[in-house]
Amino acid sequence: MAAMTPTTPTTPTTPTTPTTPATRYPRLREDTREPDTGAPVRTPARRPRPRIWRGAVLALAGAYFLIPLIASFVFTVHVPGRGITFEAYTELLSADGFTESLLLSLGLAAATIALSLLLAVPALVAVRIGSPRLRPVVEVMCMLPLVVPPIALVTGITTVLRWGPDHLSRTPLYQTFIAVQHEKFPVVLVLAYTVLALPFVHRSLDAGLRAIDVPTLVEAARSCGASWPYVVLRVLLPNLRASLAGAAFLTLALVLGEFTIASLLGFQPFAVWIVSISGAQARMSVAVSILSLLITWLLLIALSRAGTTPSTAGAAPATTSRKEP
């Protein structure tokens, strides 16, 4: 009797496809990141970029820089009652002190660039190769001039230069103090400008050294028998050309526009001379300011092109930077 219990027929089951990583995670298109169904891809329409804001910002920045220059130029060439005249520009070369002050500023700028690079390049390369842990210390020391106002710096320089008892008047130290204050080329200004330029020189060179693998370059050159001067001049400096040009760029702009230290120490470079003639010859002083801007821009463009133009020979191939510890 137990065999009389009805049994339900079993329905055939469809074979299940084994689950694989490809079925669980369908392949995605690389361009749209959607499942690849074989259908043609429709590229979404791009939204128009707000170019009007770019133009507005560019126009605002251009007006901010150009309107004062145009107004200054109009002031120099327009004389009430006489109309347009270029006397303010034609009388520049014959003005007392123009050539001397301009040459003095250019000479101070060249000496400051040379001295700051001679100090910063070997120091930063030595720290990079020999003592990487000292890099924060060197960075803090180079950044100190940013927190010291120029008036405090020039007060300290004046105190040091005035120090000198009578019994030291015939010693080399006293004669050195006199020599660095020579009117034709005051070395004391070069020393002060070098201190002021250290933060900018350090930033520019440090960025260049981070972009190349200095230990590997030095080790490879030394393994080939190169001397240390050859390594620095023919291996490292060509790879730091852009950084060197940037450091010179910033130092030149700093020296040509510096006024406080030179004025308080009693010297007359180009910036001080412009201020000195502004009281008696206002148009000429504005014309000199415009001319100094043009000279500065031309020099900065020349330095910028010197740092970006590839050299034809003598440059070592750049290497990839090593990951910073």
Image (cartoon, helix red, strand yellow):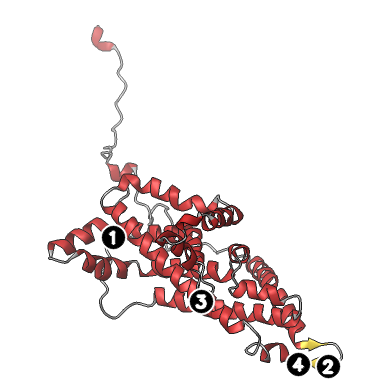
Q: CA distance from mark 1 to mark 3?
A: 37 Å
Residue ranking furthest to the right: 81
- Counting from the top left corner in percent of width and height, residue 164 is at 50, 55
**Which residue is painted at 27% across and 58% down in the image?**
214
Q: Is residue 208 visible?
A: no
Of badges 1 and 2, nearer the viewer stands: 2
Q: CA distance from mark 4 to mark 2?
A: 8 Å
Q: Earlier in the sequence, mark 1 or mark 2?
A: 2
The residue carrying mark 4 is 85
- Counting from the top left corner in percent of width and height, residue 243 is at 40, 66
Which amino acid lies under the numbered mark 4 shown in the image of this protein?
A: Thr
Q: Are marks 4 and 2 in contact (CB under 8 Å)?
A: yes
**Which residue is painted at 50% across and 61% down in the image?**
192
Q: CA distance from mark 4 to mark 3?
A: 29 Å
- Answer above or below: position of 153 versus 82: above
The residue carrying mark 3 is 106
The residue carrying mark 1 is 320
